[in-house]
């Protein structure tokens, strides 16, 4: 599977909640850090707390703000306050149950790369597990601004509340993801990734970018330095083709 274009990141550690953890994650070699603003998440940051985290992220490491169903005004305000490098939309692709992040958000956030979290639908004979993602990506491009990257996370039900949309430890079916084929934007795999399985996920999915939160924690929102270092090292070796 060959994703289109260049990845926004290769190894992202999401849900960082302290300045000390931000410094540690960057020192371990991650090239992106996720700051979570999703209501109900155990990793949700308040603005004052987020300022300290963002200030601790060194140059060369991307600050990614993670949102689900937030208003454009709120996202842009936080992005300016913190100097975010990209916005990650983690809400539902469509439907009647919030939180929803529609395709027009890419255009409305113009000037900030948008990373779109999508879900791999349960495999059905002859079906395309990434069909909803393809539709959203195409609609965003038609609306005037394509997504910069897609993260394929574990599947959730349509009515799942915002705080349970990610960071749950549920795993993506990597083989099914590989069979689903590529998207016209760079792709990353997330969902249940740990230091022990990230290399396998990279080999099985064919992707060269990964994202984790709970898989490197000692408790929700508290990163374990040994797990972070092991995860980044294993992912980096696998991305380079070293197993």
Image (cartoon, grey):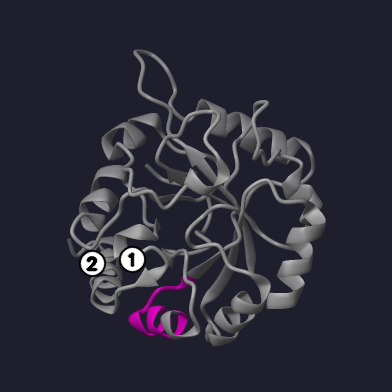
Q: Quadrant of residue 238?
A: bottom left
User: Neighbour class for label 2 at 10 Å: few (<14), some, many (≥20)?
Assistant: many
In the foreground, 221 or 104: 221
Image position, residue 213 (x, y; %): 39, 60
Secondary structure predominantly adopted by residues drawn in magenta: helix
Q: Quadrant of residue 25?
A: bottom left
Instruction: Please give the label number shown on residue 219.
Output: 1
Q: Is residue 140 left or right of residue 198?
A: right
Q: Is residue 239 left or right of residue 140?
A: left
Q: Secondary structure at mark 2?
A: helix
Residue 27 lies in the magenta stretch: yes
Q: Secondary structure at mark 1?
A: strand
Residue 230 lies in the magenta stretch: no
Residue placed at 38% from the left, 57% from the top? 210
Image position, residue 143 (x, y; %): 79, 38
- The answer to whether residue 143 is above or below residue 67 is above
Image position, residue 144 (x, y; %): 79, 43
Whether residue 84 is visible to the viewer of this picture, yes or no, is no
Whether residue 213 is visible to the viewer of this picture, yes or no, is yes
Q: Are marks 2 and 1 in contact (CB under 8 Å)?
A: no
Image position, residue 100 (x, y; %): 66, 38
- Region in magenta: 22-32
Q: Earlier in the sequence, mark 2 or mark 1?
A: 1
Instruction: Please give the label number shown on residue 202.
Output: none
Which residue is denoted by mark 2 in the rendering? 234
What is the distance, in whole Å, between disc 2 and disc 1 at their CAs?
21 Å
């Amino acid at each position: 599977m060959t994703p289109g274009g260049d990845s926004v990141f290769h190894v992202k550690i999401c849900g960082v909640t302290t300045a000390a953890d931000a410094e540690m994650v960057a020192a371990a070699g991650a090239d992106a850090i996720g700051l979570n603003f999703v209501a109900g998440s155990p990793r949700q940051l308040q603005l004052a707390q987020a300022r300290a985290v963002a200030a601790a992220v060194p140059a060369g490491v991307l600050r990614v703000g993670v949102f689900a169903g937030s208003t454009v005004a709120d996202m842009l305000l936080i992005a300016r306050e913190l100097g975010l490098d990209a916005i990650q939309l983690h809400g539902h692709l469509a439907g009647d149950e919030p939180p929803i992040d529609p395709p027009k958000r890419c255009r409305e956030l113009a000037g900030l790369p948008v990373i779109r979290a999508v879900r791999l639908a349960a495999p059905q004979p002859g079906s395309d597990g990434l069909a909803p993602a393809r539709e959203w990506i195409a609609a965003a491009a038609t609306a005037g601004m394509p997504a910069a990257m897609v993260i394929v996370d574990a599947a959730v039900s349509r009515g799942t509340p915002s705080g349970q949309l990610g960071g749950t430890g549920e795993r993506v079916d990597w083989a099914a993801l590989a069979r689903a084929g590529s998207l016209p934007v760079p792709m990353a795999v997330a969902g249940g990734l740990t230091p022990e399985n990230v290399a396998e996920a990279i080999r099985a999915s064919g992707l060269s970018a990964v994202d984790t939160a709970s898989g490197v924690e000692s408790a929700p929102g508290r990163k374990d330095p040994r797990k972070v270092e092991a995860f980044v090292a294993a992912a980096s070796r696998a991305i380079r083709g070293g197993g």
